[in-house]
Image: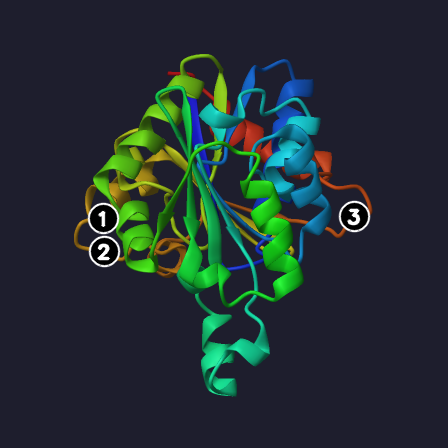
Amino acid sequence: MVLVVVSGLLPFNSGKTFFTLALAEYLRRSGYSVGVVKPVAAHSFWEQYEYFLESRDLGVLVGEDVVRYVRAGLIKDIDLQNPVDIMTAPHDLMKHPSLDSYLTSLTSLIDQAVLVRISSAGQRNYYLVRENLERVGDHLANEIRGFVSGLGRVDEVDRSWLYNKLVSKEIDSLIVESVSSVMSRHDVTLCESFSNALLPALGLRGLVKHVIVVTPSKALAYGPGKVITYMSALDRLRSETPFLVMLFKPDTILSIKPSTEYGKIVEEEAEKLKSLILSGRMT
């Protein structure tokens, strides 16, 4: 059982899902059992409207990345493999007292979060952030309310509650349980981190042996030696991905070319990673 965390160097659009899908497909073609976990997902109602409609059809809140994993057969249990999902929606400019206030709101996940799913112990728990929903345009807000009305119980929370919940030990433990469960079933588990966080949960630092840092056109792979060293000092170091890159030279650097097919990378590059991840380390 090997755990590989795929982390983004950038807060947005690093290409984590594209890369994770490609690596997972290559490992599967090579004969390995591969599991994928995206413990925390965030997606915009506005930018991923078609996937919001798919959520409505599925009856569970999910975003584009998870839908792609589901279609590829890499996520079969959404609640286990994607226990935390956050849907955001941009505020209506005319509902803000100033342009500065509006622009500031667009930089904050917590300010834009309108609906959150936390799946735990066989239950889906939904949380509606009403103070954020009230600042969304009326048409968007009405569609979201319509979706919420079909979910059963939905608890209303404020931004402060949501922030504290997401950074709580409870969520950290939930993510560790999710990843551990998937690991127990597969040769290799690929865990996609969140934004530019090195790990989606600090509790994973004792499990992870490989980290792949993704940024447009490049993937930087770190093996057990450097990863274990960094993780052992994580209490004293920063938990964002760029700090690992600043401190350690990667063991392997891959070039990622643009592709018209989602999740395709050059086989020679994937083979380098397979060798690093699996050579004598199936423990």
Amino acid marked by disc 2: Leu
Instruction: Classify mark 2: helix, strand or loop.
Output: loop
- CA gap between label 3 and label 2 equals 36 Å
- CA gap between label 2 and label 1 equals 5 Å
Which residue corresponds to mark 3? Answer: 259
Q: Quadrant of the C terminus?
A: top left
Image marks 3 and 1: residues in contact by CB distance under 8 Å: no
Identify the mark nearer the N-term, 3 or 1.
1
**Residue nearer the viewer, 24 or 77:** 77
Image marks 3 and 2: residues in contact by CB distance under 8 Å: no
Which residue corresponds to mark 2? Answer: 237
Residue at (46, 56) in percent of width and height: 113
Numbered badge on residue 172: none
Give left or right: position of 67 versus 236: right
Specify the farthest residue to the left.
Answer: 236
Amino acid marked by disc 3: Ser
Image marks 2 and 1: residues in contact by CB distance under 8 Å: yes
Give left or right: position of 132 versus 176: right
Q: Position of residue 205 (x, y in %)?
A: 28, 36
Residue at (54, 42) in percent of width and height: 148
- Mark 1 is surrounded, within 10 Å at the Cα level, by few (under 14), some (14 to 19) or many (20 or more) other residues, namely few
Q: Position of residue 261 (x, y in %)?
A: 80, 41
Give left or right: position of 3 versus 215: left
Instruction: Classify mark 3: helix, strand or loop.
Output: loop
Q: Position of residue 236 (x, y in %)?
A: 17, 54
Q: Position of residue 70 (x, y in %)?
A: 64, 27
Which residue corresponds to mark 1? Answer: 234
Instruction: Classify mark 1: helix, strand or loop.
Output: loop
Amino acid marked by disc 1: Leu
Residue at (36, 22) in percent of width and height: 180
